[in-house]
Amino acid sequence: MKAAESASYSRISNHMNSSINSSQWSDVISCGSGNKSSIAEEVEEKLHQIRDRQKKKRERSVEQPSVLSFFPEKEVEKPYEIEYRNKKIKYLEERVHKPLVNTRYVRKDGASTPLKHRTQSANLVTGAFSSLLPKILELLNDKYDLRMDIKKNIESLYKELEGMQAVLHDLARREQAQLDAVVMIWAKEVRDLSYNVEDMIDSLTGEEIRGLSEKTPFFFLVNDTDFIYENREKVINEIREKVKGVASRREKYKVDDRIVAAYPKATDNVDPPLLDLFQESEEVIGIEAQVEEVIRQLKGHDWDNNNNKLKIVSIVGMAGSGKTTLAKAIAKAVPKEVLHDTVFVSVSQDPNMKRVLMDILLQIDEREYRSLTGSTFDAKLLINIIRRVIGSKGYFIVIDDIWDVKSWKFIKDALDTRCGSRVVITTRLLEVAVNAGDVYKLKALSHSHSGELFNTRLFGGKDNVPRVVPEVPEKLLQKCGGVPLAIITMASLFARKPRNYCSKVHTNVSFGSAVGGNRDVDETRRILLSSYYNLPYHLRACLLHLQVFPEDYLITEETLIWKWAAEGLIVEEPGRGLFEIGDGYFKELIDSSVVMPVEDDSDYGTIVGCRVHYLVFDMICSLSAIENFVTIEDGSSQYSLIESKQARRLGIQKWTTENGDPLANIGSRSLRSFNTTGCRFSVELSLSRFKLLRVIAIEECTLLDGDLSPLGKLILLRYLGLYHTLIKKLPEDIGELIYLQTLDLRGTRVHGLPWEVTQISQLKCLRADGDTAMPYGMGKLTSLEELRLGAIDTSADFVDGLGRLTELRELEIRINQLDVNEAGALVQSLKKLEKIQVLRLVGFPWPPSRVDELNWGNFDPPQQLRELHLSIPSTRPPAWVHVSRVPMLSHLVVSLKSKEDQDLDILGALPELSSLQLVLPSKVVLSITGRSGAFPRLRYFRTSVPAKFLRGAMPTLEFLHFDANFDFDPDFAASTLGNLPSLQKVEVEITSNALSFESMNEVMKRAVDQHRNHPSLRVIKVDHVHAGFLEQFKWPATRHIAVILGGSSSRVTTQHWQS
């Protein structure tokens, strides 16, 4: 078996057009069982069947039409047709539920096997190749019963397409400017080919399934069981001809030779002198406080050189955020009498490490070490020289623009001497920063500093700014987002223009339109592209996909990941779920500083999504337009931008009722994804004519209460998002959307799901709220990974079905009625959810008077549980909420009827707990002791009663919220805030009858003023008349405060808010 497998693998590694018959038969042998004679008999029998089928097909004299052709309906169904139809129904039922990749070519141990395709995400670089190639392999499955010559064609086709994919990967390492027009045209043709071929295969599959469900004329014309196979063969031959045409043009135009002639890589270093353009104006504006913060981290307890340990601080931020400028400012601010001298070295991408080491030596003593320049000394010798030179003196060293951990570790070997040196590194990558030392995340410039920097650049220097200047438009500064590079580049666009010019055009300004005509813009684009080309191939496509969202839009992580999955940008891996893989993609984009993380204000430190800075968004739009990755239509032009394009992913933005149907002018039927957010439509959207749609996302839109029934015909649909629309009813045939993965109905008027939903066996994410009732048989949805529901029906069917959803990773349900028996059954079902990571059981309305306390008994939680939300009141926290049972628990919401001292001790021992919300009766007095090691990572604490903190309690706490009841003594809490050394924000909620608002405001203001961090303060006053109503929203999910009053302090905010 091993020999056969090795032989077949060597065949695959040969020339593209070589036959791989041996791989087929070695695969059959390796999968067989029994002795050699039985295997040989099985192979001989298979050959005999193939010869018989080929003989029959040669005898056919009439060529059958394609599956994709139109077939007239027959009036009478004959007996043999009924027999055939029943066979095909059974076959297609098996086909629908089988994995997309043929398991014959995937070994369970994950090792390499003949024809195993190394799955990568579909992306801009490779088009649809990564999702296409497994589908090509699938056609080799014996169930398709294709002739051997057709199988050979498929094998040849696979190798040709795989070779094209490899060429596109090679092109991705080169900048577009380095490639000539012929190569770019051919690459575009290859990408288009991959999409078109995948569409042909998917259309074939969709037509077969649709034919069964609708009983189309196709099944009334079948004359024998070979009909469907011959039509598949015709489609395969059509695909082969298309691929041969593209391959022939590769040779004709000598594409490979042209690629070799291009420059080696797209990740060439950005020339450090070019960055001076962006540093001159910003170096003295708005960074003084950040300089002090970093110096404080570097200094530690003191500057005493007797402390010989190397101290390192990493400054991390996106391109152009001012990392280098901050590092230079820190170097100037470090006392010269403390550290011997300053060294500043820029590394950049793909560095020559010997050159970097020589730069360090030359800055230490150029006269002494100039003779080493150009020498043949190896890097190890240079490291030893540096260690010897700096070993006796303390230096301040800046290592600028590091792109990988390996380069940093190499440099650190030279610096890691016991000399008391201080090192600052700058990087765009969080992974590098964490590996280096203490992390300092660069802050954006304030609004006032942004305006000051803009004017300084606009007028050519700080001294040239007139005393009276027009105010910089608010929206223009918002676009820049406090990023110095964006501000300077924006200012350069308006330099030497009339002073009122920027107020007229700021809404339509684009950096892309100025490329090639403005040096600042050109260098900005080059700096940003270095971040883009540093991303792995699969992340480039995920980044460009963000263009489907409006500019400056809060993109929630979970919604984004499920859209990536539906688009084919995430490919399942053995043993890992789609969401788990996508979550890794999302974190990589954040850690690469190409998108900005957004934290949940109501749960401090929890990243809920991201935003794309205008600089990056502009780059994304330019790259996407070149490659036709996403098409945007906003109705601003009289003529549609998409009439002449083959749109595959369409984003509709800023659409109003006057614009009509945005799909009316789309002639191409190749549309795969339709996305629209915050638009108003006055007509029905003609989506049903686009049979290849995988994604429909109509979110936060105003729609006519139209008929969605045509959507049930879109067999290939994988994502249906109707978040916050007025839709009332789903199509009755929604069960035919057999590939649907995500159904988002939050904020709709859908009151009940049709029972057909339970037939969607591949559904992975179901979100609903309010009164959306689940149908009978929910336990059939065994692929679900995320389930969010409103007020649930606690019937036996629902509770029992819940226990069958063993793939659930996240569960959120609201319970308004639960008796003792139902509570026991619910716990028994929860025991079976061994993969659960997020569990939210919400009592509703508050307080949930009709919900009995859950009796957890011997419940054994999964070790990976990281978020637990139990707002159903209980006497004590569940016994299993313990460090030994849930060591990864980071977020906890719990409602208790009473408080025991040991409860806080148990919660304080949870090592990963970063967020705690504790609901207690109003008469409880809460005192947090300073037990050693308690709450080591807690950043967010919200409690419904006042709290007193003893010294050492919650050392990492940054956000504190508590409620003031009628007996509240303001000095009780305010006097102990100083015992929270990391405190940044304080929030207090009082009722109108509790005590004087002015008194509370004054006491709390005094407390925060005395705190060394001067935390921000928000005092919230709630009308007692409405307090009972508001209480039901307080814990946990939606919090809506009607009135907030503020005092004279600037840190006391006054606003209407919702979290």
Image (spheres, rainbow, N blue to C red):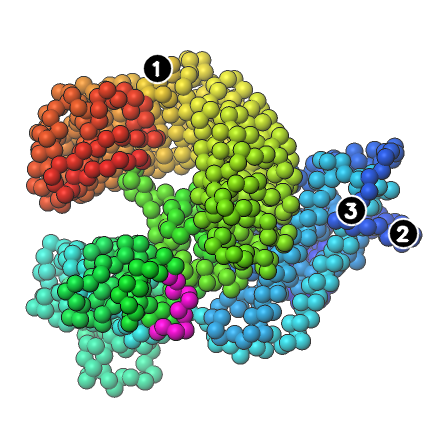
Indicate the amino acid at tag 2.
Val
The residue range painted magenta reads 509-519
The amino acid at mark 1 is Ser
- Compared to 626, does 369 lie above or below? below
Is 428 left or right of 795, judged from the image as shown?
left
Residue 724's x, y, as percent? 45, 36
Label 1 vs label 3, nearer the camera: 3
Taking 864 as reference, is 8 left or right?
right
Q: Position of residue 621 (x, y in %)?
A: 45, 59
Rounded to the nearest whole Å, what is the CA distance between mark 1 and mark 3?
62 Å
447 or 938, nearer to the observer: 447
Q: CA distance from mark 1 to mark 2?
A: 75 Å
Give the residue type at disc 3: Phe
Tag 2, which secondary structure? loop
The kind of secondary structure element at disc 3 is loop
User: Which residue is depicted at the point 11% across and 39% down?
Assistant: 1048
**Most foreground residue, 580 or 683:** 683
Q: Which residue is mark 1?
A: 849
Q: Main secondary structure of the magenta part?
A: loop
Q: Can you give x and y, in whole percent of width and height, for residue 577 in the image?
A: 50, 42
Q: Which mark is residue 70?
A: 3
Residue 62 is labelled as: 2
Q: Is residue 161 magenta?
A: no
- Closest to the camera, between mark 3 and mark 2, is 3
Q: Is residue 922 left or right of residue 854?
A: left
Determine contact: label 1, label 3, CB under 8 Å: no
Query: Marks 3 and 2, how far apart in space?
Result: 17 Å
Q: Secondary structure at mark 1?
A: loop
Assign the C terminus to one quadrant of the image: top left
How dense is the environment of label 3, judged by Cα within 10 Å: few (below 14), some, or many (20 and up)?
few
